[in-house]
Image (cartoon, rainbow, N blue to C red):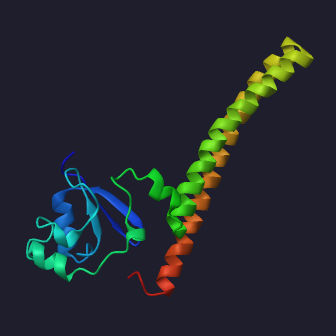
Amino acid sequence: MADQWYYTRQGQRFGPLSTEQMRQLAQAGQLQQTDLVWTEGITEWTPAGRVPQLFAAAPAAGGAAGAPAVPAAGLPDSGPGGGGLFAALDLGFTRFVTTAIVRWLWILFLILAPLGYLVAVVIALVTRGVGAGVVTILVGAAALILYTLLIRIWLETVAVLFRIAEYLRDMSQGQKK
């Protein structure tokens, strides 16, 4: 576990990667000294230039001095799992829409759909009898599974569309190669 690195660039998180993979990214120019990195043993996200084992040719102090200041709003919260207060308040296009909203919509569906199913079964049992209750249990279970799959596909599609939109926006601004 100690050899699992994560890094973030332009609000997007990557990893886990090994130390060797991180070195290769640095040598290839895909990991910049200003990109934020995290691994176990580091208390908070740190510019990669301050981590000597990632940039062997760059001295630790020189890399840190040459790195531009990273705005606090762009810092991810602690650890690879994300979450917390900063993630909830992060209004960045991709992270807010695709991560927070889609996740909360999925959780809301996972809570409300089974509750609706149970209410439908109870209403059928009470108002129409055991036969209608059994039919509602069977048909409702199949419908619940189908709706769960459809909602998940829809939410994933929404997430992908927002990521494509952000990527196109970054391309038009010349931020990605």
Residue located at (75% from left, 22% from top) = 137
Residue located at (65% from left, 54% from top) = 154
Q: Nearer the viewer, residue 27 or 87?
A: 87
Q: Nearer the viewer, residue 152 or 103?
A: 103
Q: Nearer the viewer, residue 77 or 103?
A: 77
**159 left or right of 23 in image:** right
Where does residue 166 sit, x and y in percent of width and height?
Answer: 52, 74
**174 left or right of 64 in image:** right
Q: Quadrant of residue 158?
A: bottom right
Quadrant including the N terminus? top left
Where does residue 6 sit, x and y in percent of width and height?
Answer: 29, 58
Q: Quadrant of residue 30?
A: bottom left
Number of labelled discs?
0
**131 left or right of 36 in image:** right
Above-or-below relation of 71 to 97? below
Quadrant including the C terminus? bottom left
Residue located at (17% from left, 80% from top) = 65
Where does residue 92 sit, x and y in percent of width and height?
Answer: 51, 69
Residue furthest out toward the right: 127
Where does residue 73 sit, x and y in percent of width and height?
Answer: 42, 69
Above-or-below relation of 124 to 175? above
Residue located at (91% from left, 17% from top) = 128
Residue furthest out toward the top: 130
**131 left or right of 117 in image:** right
